[in-house]
Image (cartoon, rainbow, N blue to C red):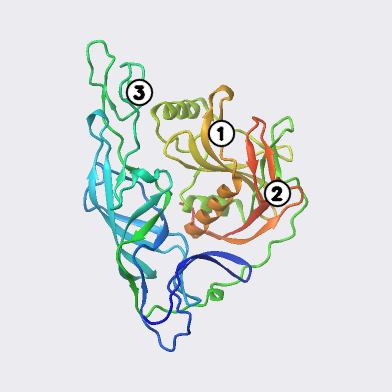
Amino acid sequence: MGGMLRIGWTVLRAHGRALSLLSVLSPLSARSARLPSVVPPGTHLPIRFLYPLASGRDTVGTRVLVQTMGALVQDSCVVGPAFTQVQGRVTLSRGGRRFGGRGEIRIAFDSLEVRRGAWVPLAAVLDTLEYAPPGDIGPSGTLYGRHASIGKRLVPAGLLGVADVDVIPAALLGGYLIARRGPRATILAGEVGGLRLEAPLVLRDAACTPPAADGDLTAPPHLPRFTPRSDTKSGVPWDPVNLIFLGTSAALDAAFAHAGWRPAHPHTTGAVVEEVLAALADRPAVAAPVSTEYFAGRPQDAAFELAGPNARIRHHVRVWALDSLAGLWVGAATKDVGIIVTKRTHRISPRVDLERDRIVRDLEAGGCADLVRYVRLPGALTRGRGPEGQLMVSDGRAAVVRLKACDPL
């Protein structure tokens, strides 16, 4: 194709709505006729996994489906809808081996949906993954299991042997040595990452839909004045309010369900014991309880979460009704990244805006919500500390999200 080309991930704002977009090979001169567009090798495509994968469990040939995290845009035309799909198949799958040998899994992605029911070939491999350090993904896209330290491989039998489901008691007489299988290579449902094109992606005769044709979203309704933060029961400031939801309680539940998020379990003895066992076993604590926070003197009406690779890491949001008759809800979103043992609480990531934006993208990808806009709330936190002294930094904005009517899952 003649002329200069440019490529990159951009953000296009159409009538006030933020859309995460892939700008693909836009010629600087106007096209007089529709020509094939060629995306060069090495291009990075942000994606989200829809289903979990594990080496040794998912065999060679298993089909894999992921979702792009934005619309495919060319020459100011949407040529592929936002949050479309990419298919692939497992080409290598090895479980963890004894004495710490790590598992391996590799996926070859082979087709991209450019519009509903219309697929084009592509050749791409995994390039980045949310919970995988850069060294755990090889140049060919092979994902390796997480490293296990010598201390975790050789421990007194009977002390930690039951604390990890991947440990196989192999036993010397004193019970001091165990032969442990190395970790599987795993990918979680909802985990985000990126693909790297290994060959040119050719788009032929793609339909052109102006971004504005996706429809304007009405402005958010007038919001009553409120203090944009949660508190402890005694009134000590806690997490900032950084989300506003417009819709019914049923629509709120359905939106998070379609995005792959789960309601947090209530605080029961069984739920707490399950979370502790998950922490000991270094495995995800799905729908584990969250601590109670208060907004306007009321505990949260709901809490949703997306489990991370272990009990220490998870995404979550607490939600309170601001005006249930008008369908107004506020949320405080934070990400757990560790455990403070002495205070029996989680350590949170200080950059709370990233969790806010993550939830917006996941809800849009689920198809049951749209971002209206970001708004600044009077008195919003930009820098502060929670009750445990943990730092929180924010731009002081809340994302206004309009919920759609979706069937419950």
Q: Amino acid at mark 1?
A: Arg
Q: Which residue is mark 3?
A: 151
Mark 2 neighbour class, 10 Å CA radius: few under 14, some 14 to 19, many 20 or more = some
Mark 3 neighbour class, 10 Å CA radius: few under 14, some 14 to 19, many 20 or more = few
- Say which element carries label 3: helix
Residue 328 visible in the picture = no
In the image, 101 versus 404, the foreground residue is 101
Q: Amino acid at mark 2?
A: Leu
Q: Which quarter of the figure is the N terminus placed in?
A: bottom left
Q: Amino acid at mark 3?
A: Gly
Label pair 2/3, CB-CB below 8 angstroms: no
Q: Which residue is mark 1?
A: 347
Left or right, 348 with respect to 260, comes to right
Q: Percent from the top left, x then y, of residue 28?
A: 48, 80
Q: Percent from the top left, x then y, of residue 391?
A: 64, 37
Mark closest to the chain's N terminus, 2 or 1: 2
- Say which element carries label 1: strand
Q: Give the Cα distance between marks 1 and 3.
A: 24 Å
Q: Percent from the top left, x then y, of residue 238?
A: 67, 37
Q: Tell me what residue is drawn at x 30 percent, y 30 percent.
A: 166
Point out the frontmost of discs 1 and 3.
3
Mark closest to the chain's N terminus, 1 or 3: 3
State which quadrant residue 229 falls in.
Answer: top right
Mark closest to the chain's N terminus, 2 or 3: 3
Q: Which residue is mark 2?
A: 322
- Say which element carries label 2: strand
